Image (cartoon, grey):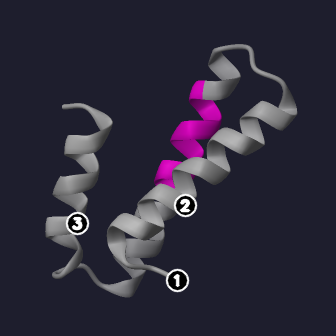
Amino acid sequence: MNAEETLNKLKEQAATMTAEQKQAAVATARKAAEDAAKAAGQTAEQITAAADAAEKAIKEALGVQ
């Protein structure tokens, strides 16, 4: 499953998720992006940018402000 398919699946599930589940999903996505960027040897600035982008994408997918 690619990133687009994952986001589409999350959008479908968002209607049945609680606020707490949505916040947990946001935190998990952010952490995963940070870990991946660190593993790739990126700079601290790049790690933060990757985490911010992941957080923004998941919030949009889940309809979280």
Disc 2 target residue:
56
The disc label shown at residue 11, or none: 3
Disc 1 target residue:
65
Residue 8: x and y, percent? 20, 55
Magenta stretch holds residue 35: yes
Secondary structure at numbered mark 3: helix
Relative to 55, residue 65 above or below: below
Circle 1 crowding by C-alpha within 10 Å: few under 14, some 14–19, many from 20: few
Q: Find the distance from the CA under tag 1 to the CA under tag 2.
A: 9 Å
* Label whose residue precedes the other's in the sequence (3 or 2): 3
Residue 45: x and y, percent? 85, 36
CB contact under 8 Å: marks 1 and 2: no
Circle 3 crowding by C-alpha within 10 Å: few under 14, some 14–19, many from 20: some
Quarter of the image where one finds residue 40: top right
- 60 vs 24, nearest the viewer: 60
Give, as a three-letter code, the residue at label 2.
Answer: Lys
Residue at image point 52% right, 39% down: 32
Residue found at the very far right of the displayed protein: 44
Quarter of the image where one finds residue 25: bottom left
Residue found at the very far top of the displayed protein: 41
* Label whose residue precedes the other's in the sequence (1 or 2): 2
Which stretch is magenta?
28-36
Q: Find the distance from the CA under tag 3 to the CA under tag 1.
A: 14 Å
